[in-house]
Image (cartoon, helix red, strand yellow):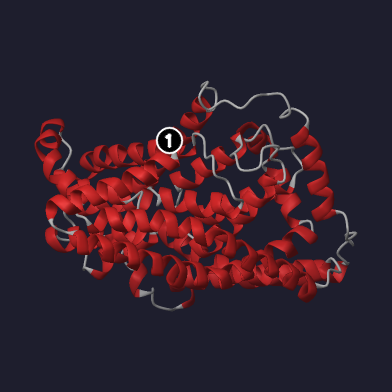
Amino acid sequence: MLNWIWLGLILCAVAVGGVEGRMKDMADGAFNMARMAVMDLALPLAGIMALWLGMMRLAERSGMVQRLAALLRPVLTRLFPDVPAHHPAMGSMLMNIAANMLGLSNAATPLGLRAMKDLENLNPRPGTATNAMCTFLAINTSSVQLIPVTAIAILAINHSTNPSAIVGTAFIATCCAAISAIIAVKVLEKLPMFRLSPASFATEPEAAGESAAEDTTSPIPLQPIAPWGIAVLAVYFLFFAGLFLVIAFPQMFGRELAADMQNDSAIIRSVKTLSLLAVPMLLSFLPLYAALRRIKVYEEFVEGAKEGFQVIIRIIPYLVAILVAIGMFRGAGAIDLITDKLHPVLDRIGFPPELLPMALIRPLSGSGALGVFTDIVKQFGPDHLFSRTAGTMYGSSETTFYVLAVYFGAVNIKRTRHAVLAGLTADLVSVIASVIICRLVFR
């Protein structure tokens, strides 16, 4: 399906660009996106990948990933029945989902790419997405987040009286999108056009899972944590608990509340503080815990970090391909043309035409969606219904085609099967849910 979408974007861009007289804009869009794919996305991502894959290696070697996966094994085995219960992919996917929920995009992408690599170890058909891969991508494209930090920041910068008002609406919309994505991916995988033949799938993944699990967890025997190590961990957690209270509830210590939290409720302040402390805590806890398990933390971190650059090299062609098509489509003015043509129809069904550019561009481009959202806020004001609805859309959906290109590109998947359709279903549900919920809450 991605083949036809990619070709369709390019052909539509050329056709519309020729009719509208925007061929230069279309060509500039292609070259700008090609440069951005490498210089602004792939290269900066290489360092972040190296960091988080190094940390992921420490988490695996210390047994932390396996412990986390064991806690949610009943849920994960239902979502991913083709993945062995003790396979490392379970832990990788769990950490990626947790990072997404906290809005830690810099951590979520590397962890997600590692999860795709683990899932590829189970794949008896290289180049074709498995059911588990499609389910994992559907969960990622539905982008469950507790706090839409970027959307709140845009509203706050534009002097909204209550920028965190969209937290509840975005959370409900993203839950609707996630549920619809899971339902869609489970239904679609059973259709004849997407179904995988069951011949080798029943046995080969099992063997692959066992060998992969041995590969990542058995070489280093785990040592128990000494009593003094448990005391060190207790002091560590007490330190971060104190930091949490100081940041989220400074009044308890005679301090003033931070300016960006003054209009927030206690629950929202707590979630924001958790997001703020999550990265420093992970970056310090994983090496500390591994060291207490007698792991050579520096050597293992470097080994894990080496994988980051290999992954980036693999995904660059996929990034260039999808972003160039999107750049041509935007530069040709196709989104503006679609908006104008659909204006009368949208009026009849009760969908605000002013929000259509946001709905169309969100699955295609994160930076483009941010620009459209900012423009809506400036045009209508930060507390207008349209601004809050656009913020809810932005905070409850993901850049679907970027996620698909990066994640599938990392493991050289060319036949994406039903992943695109499931992701777009989640985007559509997110848009519809955002409009309905915001009308009910902010009318």
Residue at 49% across / 61% down in the picture? 105
* Residue 436 position (above or below residue 192): below
- Asked if residue 424 lies left or right of residue 28, the reply is right
The local crowd at label 1, few if under 14, some if 14 to 19, many if 20 or more residues have their Cα within 10 Å, is: some
Residue lying at the far bottom in this picture: please name it.
255
Helix, strand or loop for disc 1: helix
Q: Nearer the viewer, residue 331 or 305?
A: 331
Residue 239, given in percent of the width and then of the height, sits at 64, 73
* Residue 409 position (above or below residue 255): above
- Asked if residue 431 lies left or right of residue 280, the reply is left
Q: Nearer the viewer, residue 103 or 206?
A: 206
Residue 437, given in percent of the width and then of the height, sits at 28, 39
Residue at 73% across / 73% down in the picture? 302
Residue lying at the far top in this picture: please name it.
192
- Visible in this render: residue 104? no
* Residue 347 position (above or below residue 383): above
Indicate the amino acid at tag 1.
Leu
Q: Quadrant of the N terminus?
A: top left
* Residue that label 1 marks: 421
Q: For residue 250, which quarter of the picture?
A: bottom left
Q: Nearer the viewer, residue 259 or 102?
A: 102
Residue at 51% across / 55% down in the picture? 406
Residue 382, given in percent of the width and then of the height, sits at 19, 60
Picture mark count: 1
- Asked if residue 384 lies left or right of residue 269, the reply is left
Q: Quadrant of the C terminus?
A: top left
- Asked if residue 184 lies left or right of residue 233, the reply is left
- Visible in this render: residue 110? yes
Residue 309, given in percent of the width and then of the height, sits at 62, 68
